[in-house]
Amino acid sequence: NTANIGVVGLAVMGSNLARNLASRTGNTVAVYNRTRAKTDELLAAHPEAGFVPAFSYAEFAASLSTPRTAIIMVKAGAPTDAVIDDLLAVFEPGDIIVDGGNALFHDTIRREQAVRSTGVNFVGMGVSGGEEGALLGPSLMPGGSDESWVTLGPILQSIAAVAEDEPCVTHIGHDGAGHFVKMVHNGIEYADMQLIAEAYDLIRRGTGKTPAEIADVFAQWNAGELDSYLIEITAEVLRQTDAATGAPLVDVIVDQAGAKGTGGWTVQTAIDLGVPVSGIAEAVFARSLSSHPEQRAVSAGLPGPAPKAAVDDVDAFIEDVRLALFASKIVAYSQGFDEIRAGAAAYDWNIDLGAVAKIWRGGCIIRAQFLNRISDAYAAEPDLAVLLTAPFFVDALTRAQDAWRSVVAAAAASGIPSPAFSSSLAYYDGLRADRLPASLIQGQRDFFGAHTYRRTDREGTFHTLWSADRSEVSAQDTH
Ligand code: NBP
């Protein structure tokens, strides 16, 4: 019983997390991997870590002090279930199993319920920040019981990224809450990346600047209110020259974006919850559209505006794009937090939205200055119904208004696809509309399906007798 924490699964994420754990004072880390070679390699490469290796689950359990705490970092899906079963065979009530893989929160809810019935605690934990985050400090989103947080909290706080002296970890909520929040984090990441890509495309096509010149634009933006990891790495990617051809690397890379699925989960879940995460959805679909070369090939000859001459005032246009990007980004985050709020209500999680914004400030891909403004907004008003209505964001959206509209209009007029910019603006205008044509939709639904409607001037539900004399009846009378 020499180790206080164990890691199962020693591929890149697990071995980096194990090294991170071992580097913090007070931790002794037991390690196990299904295939022995990975364990041997890790031990040989990192003798300084003082790992306690195990070559069976029984050995692994025996090497851990109680309550035993193990973090699973294996391929999400069936492998996670297999490892949980193997651990349950050797663990005892009160022990803690943490799944740090990218599990779908529905699976986490199911696993938590099954594991809880054995008396063992199960914690689904979102881990953000990729390989480097795992090694040096990830953003951690643990769910699970309050009891497990007592043991787990201090360990996780010791390995998490630090932002403004605060560890990037908080107990998100029970059962699947952590994986839910990690899922939405990834959805927001999709939207943020798509928005940045659209900004680049607009500047390139609108001004004729080279990728290296646009890298300078992004580097400059990174010194202002857009300061974030994604803007920073965008400058790096755009500045990169391909060694083989001498061309900008971005022109050599095939323009078909891949995806591992978490963005799609965010959208599917939002549909289930009735939350309009249109910016995230556009980002997911933009990747899908890019990845159908056969459809793009047969569509290449479709009519559209001739490429325009470069804009007159390059600097003014770039500033407009910056403002449009900032406004659209506010929409994306507002939609993402709306989904977390709705998920918390639906699954009975008590999620502190301001704390979520704070733990994303370090370690993860969407880390940004901007997240401080989100935590400020929820600190001022914990029940904020729409994040973008917080005063700071209203100011920003007021400043960005004209630029946002003119950029979306210019994109449409010039035939430059900007799905995330445009849909963010449409969402914003939809929210602020005094009346929406949803009234007409209700009329149509009543016409073909007698779905009834409510009136603006009286209580009750009503139906018009469309195929008779078109008089209106109270809906109770129609059934
Ligand atoms: P992989 O997702 O590639 O998984 C490989 C690991 O799973 C190996 O240790 C492998 O053992 C183990 N494994 C498999 Br596959 N089936 C198993 C089974 N039936 N029983 C026991 N072990 C099994 O590793 P990764 O890229 O390090 O990611 C680990 C987790 O972290 C994933 O869930 C991933 O989604 C998540 N994650 C990844 C990132 C990232 O940036 N890569 C970020 C955040 C979260 P073997 O050696 O015996 O084959």
Image (tube, rainbow, N blue to C red):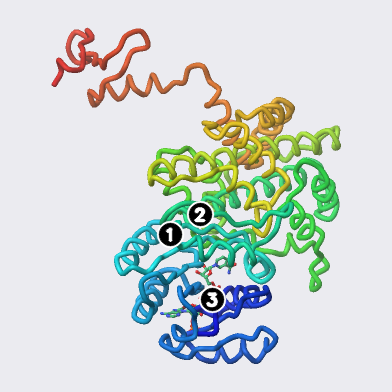
On screen, 386 above or below 9?
A: above
For label 1, being within 8 Å of ligand 1 is answered: no
On screen, 245 above or below 380?
A: below
Of residues 354 and 203, the one nearer the viewer is 354
SS of the residue at dot 1? loop
Other residues around mark 2 within 10 Å, as few (<14) / some (14–19) / many (≥20): many
Q: CA distance from mark 1 to mark 3?
A: 24 Å
Tag 3: residue type?
Answer: Ile
Q: Which residue has dot 3 on it?
A: 5
User: Earlier along the polypeptide chain: callout 3 or callout 2?
Assistant: 3
Q: Which one is in front in this view, the residue at disc 3 or the one at disc 2?
A: 3
Q: Which residue has dot 1 on it?
A: 104
Q: Which one is in front in this view, the residue at disc 1 or the one at disc 3?
A: 3
Tag 1: residue type?
Answer: Leu
Residue at (46% x, 63% y) in the render: 148
Of residues 151 and 456, the one nearer the viewer is 151
SS of the residue at dot 3? strand
SS of the residue at dot 2? helix
Give the number of the disc on residue 183. 2
Q: CA distance from mark 3 to mark 2?
A: 26 Å
Percent x, y of residue 367: 68, 52
- In which quadrant will I find the C terminus? top left
